[in-house]
Image (tube, coloured by chain):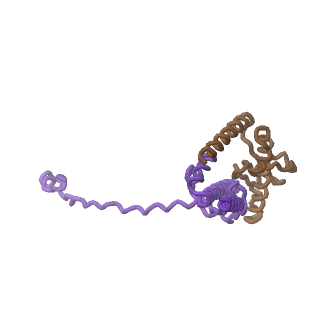
Chain colours: A purple, B brown
Amino acid sequence: MAAVNEERMQATERLQRDLAALTATVEHPNGTCMVTASPKGEIKALHLHPALLKQGARAVGEVVTETVRLATNAAVQLSFNKMALALGDGMAIDVESIAGDSPFRSTWNPVTPPEAPAEQAPQERRTRAPRVEDPDEDAFFDNPSWLR
Amino acid sequence: MDDDVERAARKVRDVEQAVSEHVTRGGPVTGRASSPDGAVTVVATPGGPPQSVEVSAAALRMGPHGLAAEIMRIADRAQRNANTRLHQTLERVVDPRELTAMGIERGTDDDESGWRR
């Protein structure tokens, strides 16, 4: 029993160390900014693509804000995953019941760029009825296409 | 085990309610920091990602590496301000030692008048 408790305590300490050092790195869907963040929203690394600066000051602010948010969400989700691995899904669900849903469950997290839209299928070609050169009544009724 | 979880959940709910009432009275807590020349301004939330990052047109001349470093520096200050402010706000309803253990540390007020509600 004592050995089991000791093992649990060691596992908990290991988990705490792992969670304290945990970060996630996310690239903005437009590819101009990459952020490494902790689950507490601390920015551990930030890379800006020169192309982003060319889009203007406002775009830089918005893209950085968005990317830090995505990286923080990813780091929080990783924490939940690590906790579930170490303590079991049951305990992770208990923690969610206290602390709130994990980002994966509570938000749609567009970490990956959206897929390119599928190529449009070419329009169905419909065979046209042969044009009647002489539109007199007899020719019209001779053309069976209007019956379709 | 279920009883322990239920007790913990109840305690969290109670503290949450006390904190919620307290914050509702005072408004959301954020921290704010700016570069001395106004190149970068960050409004941060305690224990979360920045609420906004603003960059001046002149800051773009710093280049991608210089600007990234400046944003990180200012974001760090803004978040420390936010944590300090939250600590000051909550220490009236939660044990300050527990706040520090949760990572909401009370920093030194060495920064500008940077934080605000």
Q: Position of residue A122 (x, y in %)?
A: 36, 63
At x 47%, y 60%, the residue is A117
Numbered marks: total: 0
Question: Is A108 or A138 nearer to us in this picture?
Answer: A108
- Direction from residue B57 to residue A137 in the image, left or right: left
Query: Residue B33, image x and y in percent?
Result: 79, 50
Q: Residue at x 69, y 52 (%)?
A: B49
Give x and y (percent) for residue B28.
Answer: 72, 40
The residue furthest front is A1
Question: In the rendering, at what x and y percent does residue B82 appear?
Answer: 77, 47
Q: Horizontal placement of A16 versus A102: left or right? A: right
Question: In which quadrant of the rendered image does the C terminus of chain B lie?
Answer: top right
Q: Nearer the viewer, residue A100 or B23?
A: A100
Residue A145: quadrant of the picture: bottom left
Asked whether A80 or A45 is in front, the reply is A80
In the shown orientation, is residue A46 left or right of residue B5? right
Q: Is residue B111 visible?
A: yes
Residue occupying the point 67% across, 54% down: A65
Q: Is residue B103 above or below residue B90?
A: below
The residue lying toward the viewer, choosing from A47 and A134, is: A47
Q: Is residue A33 visible?
A: no
